[in-house]
Every structure is written in C-alpha cells, then in structure tokens.
Amino acid sequence: MSETALDGVRVLEYCNFISGPYCAKLLADLGAEVIKIEKPVTGDEARQKGPFPEDIAHPERSGLFLYLNTNKMGITLNPETPAGKKIFTKLVKDTDILIEDTTPGTMECLGLGYKFLKEVNPSIIMTSITPYGQTGPYREYKAQHLNVYHMSGQAHFAHMIKLSEGQAPVKSGGYVGDYDAGLSGAVATMAALYKRNLSGTGQQIDVSRQEAMISLDRVDMGYVINDTGINNAGGRLVGGLMPCKDGYVVVVAPLQHQWEALVKLMGNPEWALGEKCRDEFTRADNAVEIQPLIEEWMLQHTMKEIYHRGQEFGCPVGPVNTAEDIFNSPQMKEREFFVDIEHPEIGRVNFPSASYIFSETPWQVTHAAPLLGANNGDIYSGRLGYSDEDIAKMKAEGTI
C-alpha cells in the first residue's frame, strides 16, 4: 500500500447521517485513521436510509451509509454514561481531530465540551457541524436538510425563472446541502491542521450548514444585497434548466461574452440581436419573452449536439446527465472514477471514488464501511486495554 496524504492523522467522528460523516470521509479517503462512533444497537441514522439492494431495508446494506463511511473504523459507544464519557476522553487524548454534529451545548452537557477536551489534549481540533452554528438566535433550532436548504435561499436562486412564472420553489434532489456542509468542514479542518502543525495549538471550528449553502449562492446573493436589479423582483437571468430534444440542458450565460457565444450556437437569430437582448440588464428585464425563444431552439437539438457545439463556441452549456450517463461516460472510465469495493454483507459494489488525483499519494480504498461495532475489539481491547470481561460488562450496561 502506498503512502497517503494524511498518514498518521487520527480522527474521531461522533456524527450522524450526512454532513459530519461526509466531512470525516473526505479525511479518511486522504489516509487519515477515522474511528466512527455510533450509538449501541441502532447505529447511525444513515443505516436506515436507502438505496438498498432489491429495495429490502437492512442496516448493513444501505448504499448511503456504505458510501459515507468507506475507509473508516467503527465502534459503538454511549458517552452519556460515566464509563462512556471516560472512554471518549481516553480516545480524545490520542486524537488529532474530533468531528461532531450534536446540537450546540450538548457536548458541554455531557462534560465533553471544547474547554474540557482541550485540557485533555491541548492540540485537539474540534470541528462542530450544526444547522445554524454555535451562536445566534437559531443556534438551538433543530433542522432537517429541507429546512436548511430553504433557509439558505438556495431554492430561490435555483428556481428563479419558475418563481417569476408563479411556481413554488422546491428543494433539489438528495441531500446536496448536507454534503456542502461536510465539504466546508473538511476544508476548514485541513486549514486548522496545517496551523496546528506549525504552532502546536488546536482550535474549535464552528460550521453552519446554512452558511455553507449560502456561500454557494455568493454571486447571486451579491446581486441582491447590492441592489443591482438582477435576480430580484425586477429581473431574471435568462437560461438555466431547459428541455431539449432528448432530455435537459443547463445554460449559464449572464455575461456578455457568454451570451454572444450562446447566440452563435443558436445561429445568430434576429431576435437575439435586438434591443431587448442588448446587455444582461435588458435581458433580465425581458427574460419572460426571451426564455421561450431559447427553449424553442433547444427543443430542436439533442443534448450531445448542444453540448459539443457549445464547446466550439465557448458557450457555458451542459447536458443534464442521468446516473447511467455518468457511469458510462468515457471521461469517467478514462479517469477510473468508479471503483469496486468488497463489503462483507453485499459483496462487490461499485462506488464513486474522489474528485482529485494525487501523483504521489493517491486516493485508495483500504476497506469498506464498517459493520456496526466492527472494531470494538480492536479499539477497546487492543488500543485501550480493556479485558473481555470489561467489554462484556460495558455492553450489558449499554455503554458500548
């Protein structure tokens, strides 16, 4: 096995579902040792979510859980018990990074807040991921992905044209916002790790899932808060999601050179050269008239025709691919993006790998997602020195 980028870095994950586990997964995929803590008996909520093979629910066969937890070790632990708190503290002593996603104040109530943990381990980096952050009037609000998605304004910006036509905003498919927060947390954690390696000092990182999503709207948000007249009630950007002959494409052409490329792609129609299309402001004011004309042209062409011809003119337009399209893409095959992983419950499965390629410390699969409590023996006996009798007692008490 070749050397990895984060060899020797130890991560403790006390998270559930997507944001925190995805943050830890990104570090595990770079070679960090990640120990995932799950609730005894029930485990991570993601175990109960699909997709499942043959649509038969099973806690060890969730595609969501398997993807989010590759390359991790797994233990069960309840830090709410005195013995569980003691074990958690022992683990933190030899940990570089703790990633947790409990409600603000929960770790303090458990006696495991950052002030206490930095006394146990002064160099610890504690990344805390919550819906709205550790401060502010919403800090204790509970939220599912649906709530955070709409609180971020993402639905408004993503469905601007539909809103102008009186249609209600909707959430994008899946849990895109939760992944965004995990990615933001991983980037911040890596920066803190770099600082700690220079100074020896750890810190707590406060990640807001809402703010992670808002940051992705930075251009659109800037238009609104600076009162440019774009993307508010007075105007709409043309383009966006559009039907074509065999599916859908996405057109992004707000800037003048992008619009001119789109016009060339469409064969320089007379209507696109008129006063209503003079600049981004006039196009926004007349988007209700312009949009159907663009769609009419798109409906006469296929996704591939539009995409490849668009490339010739430098037009930012792309096909809306299905999962099957992506899997069969020659680009993905050439880059070996999809890899086989062997799992003890469902056998060999194919998974997405990583969006980067390192020349010296490549991404690699060391093991599939852990079965519930798979590494209890390795950690409790091998690393912490508990006897079989101790482990049996803690299991009977509900500690592990």
Image: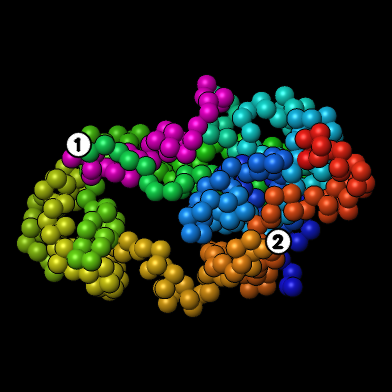
Q: Quadrant of the N terminus?
A: bottom right
Q: Residue at x 11, y 48 (%)?
A: 289
Which of the image's four quarters has the C terminus?
Answer: top right
Q: Indicate the colouring scheme.
A: rainbow
How packed mark 2 is, by other alpha carbons closer than 10 Å (few <14, some 14-19, many 20 or more), is: many
Left or right of residue 379: residue 308: left
Name the one closer to the observer, 214 or 103: 103
Q: Which residue is mark 1?
A: 166
Along the viewing direction, whichever of 400 and 241 lies nearer the viewer: 400
Q: Which residue is mark 2?
A: 31
Report the side of 38 relative to 273 (left or right): right
Instruction: Label 1: state its secondary structure.
Output: loop
Magenta residues (range): 137-165
Q: Residue at x 48, y 76 (%)?
A: 333
Q: Residue at x 66, y 25 (%)?
A: 105
Front one among 212 and 380:
380
Q: Is residue 164 above or below residue 275?
A: above
> Within the magenta stretch, is there residue 162?
yes
Q: Percent position (x, y) of residue 2? A: 73, 73
The x, y position of residue 398, in whole percent, is 77, 35
